Image (cartoon, helix red, strand yellow):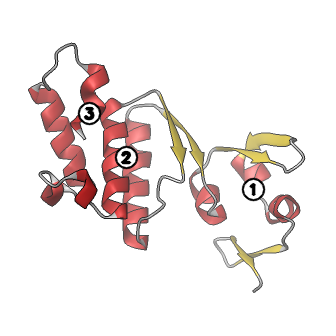
Amino acid sequence: MLSGSYALTTSYWEDQDHLHAAEALLKSLGLSDNVNQAVSELSGGELRRAEIARLMLQNPNVMLLDEPLNHLDLHQQKATQDILLNHLAAHNNAALWVEHDLNRARAIASHAVLLKGDGSWQVGKAGDLLTAANLSQLLNTPLQSIGEQDYLSVSY
């Protein structure tokens, strides 16, 4: 994970600030027990969280995230999502987050881009774009909003 701080330092060796930051990130993501474990020995979910920790250690102004919660169980999805969102907010950073979970996208996005099969696209505020009608048309699948939370669902 400390390889994530390589771009931030002018020396070959990590400094104490980077070590402390890395330890804090690993702890927040539940990876403290994996510190001395080889990357090849990590589970898919542990590896995904370690990759996210490495990215957060770099603290880029804009994070490019492609399904960042993939390979995580439900509990870890929510915890890691909250850690990522809090990190972005605390550092006033942004993320371009590719997400196929429509309900998660609607819950966390401020803006959205809908990419259509014919090469056209729409961009705007998430609340305006991520509607059942727009997404039904985009996905060529009838979706319905259900419940007070307005969750999207498809009939199986």
CA separation, marks 1 and 3?
37 Å
Image point (41%, 65%), residue name: 72
Residue bearing the label numbered 3: 3
- Residue 143 in the image, given as x and y percentages of width and height: 80, 73
Would you identify the image quadrant in which residue 150 lies?
Answer: bottom right
**Position of residue 127 in the picture relative to residue 72 (left or right):** right
Observer-nearest of 26 and 39: 39
* Pair 3/2: label in front: 3
Helix, strand or loop for disc 3? helix
Residue flagged by tag 2: what amino acid is it? Ile
Q: Is residue 28 visible?
A: yes
3 and 2 marks in contact (CB < 8 Å): no
Would you identify the image quadrant in which residue 11 lies?
Answer: top left
Q: Is residue 6 above or below residue 50?
A: above
Residue bearing the label numbered 1: 130
For the N terminus, the quadrant is: top left
Image point (19%, 53%), residue name: 38
Residue bearing the label numbered 2: 52
For the C terminus, the quadrant is: bottom right
* Pair 1/2: label in front: 2
Q: Earlier in the sequence, mark 1 or mark 2?
A: 2
